[in-house]
Image (spheres, rainbow, N blue to C red):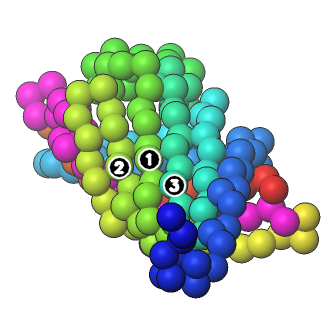
Amino acid sequence: MGRSKNAASRPPSEPAVQRIIDVSASSVTLRTRATGLFARFAHDLEIEARGFSGWVEVEGASTTAELTFPVAELRVVGVLRAGRVARNVLSSKDVLEIERKVRMEVLVGPTVIVRWSGDLLRGELRVVAPRGEQRLAVAVTVDTKSDSTLVVRGRMRISLNRLGCPEVKAPFGAFKVADDVDVEAVLALGA
């Protein structure tokens, strides 16, 4: 039994290269918006995802990745005002209450898993939360630093409803958190 002619003429496949995400040089931020009649009395927030881990594997033109975000490590950075983050608007008590509400009422679970499949610049992102999931087509940009670190940047909008999160609103519906949350990720992938 010899090799078929097609198999013999194929170039050897490139070995898979796995890169670990350098969390110390990476960031993932979420931005929420208040909507409703009294939204101007509420706060749009920036929340930072800390303590996440993950990997990226590149094999030829195919790229897969997985990131794990501990819900308990989501931290309120501050209030968004005119595109800037004001860090001293909320009291420490308010910050702790918002973070508690995210853990105990909104996401209600230990982790959110994000999986990527496609090529290095365009693919499908699958966000898996404790009570739901969402698939998104996402394009990213990639820069290579002098030390061969890849810096991947991407923006996307996720739906709290599709992730199975309950509607977040003030008493009597005075305002609520908009369903769509803007996410910006900057990931440093070590060589």
Bounds of the magenta segment = 148-173
The kind of residue tagged 3 is: Thr
Tag 3 residue: 64
- Mark number, residue 115: 1
The kind of residue tagged 2 is: Arg
> Can you say whether 165 is above or below 187 in the image?
above
The kind of residue tagged 1 is: Arg
Regarding mark 1 in the picture, which secondary structure is present there?
A: strand
Question: Looking at this rendering, what residue extends furthest in the left direction?
Answer: 172
Earlier-in-chain disc, 1 versus 2: 1
CB contact under 8 Å: marks 1 and 2: yes
CB contact under 8 Å: marks 3 and 1: yes
Question: Looking at this rendering, what residue extends furthest in the front direction?
Answer: 1
In percent of width and height, residue 116 lies at 45, 54
Earlier-in-chain disc, 2 versus 3: 3
Q: Is residue 52 left or right of residue 32?
A: right
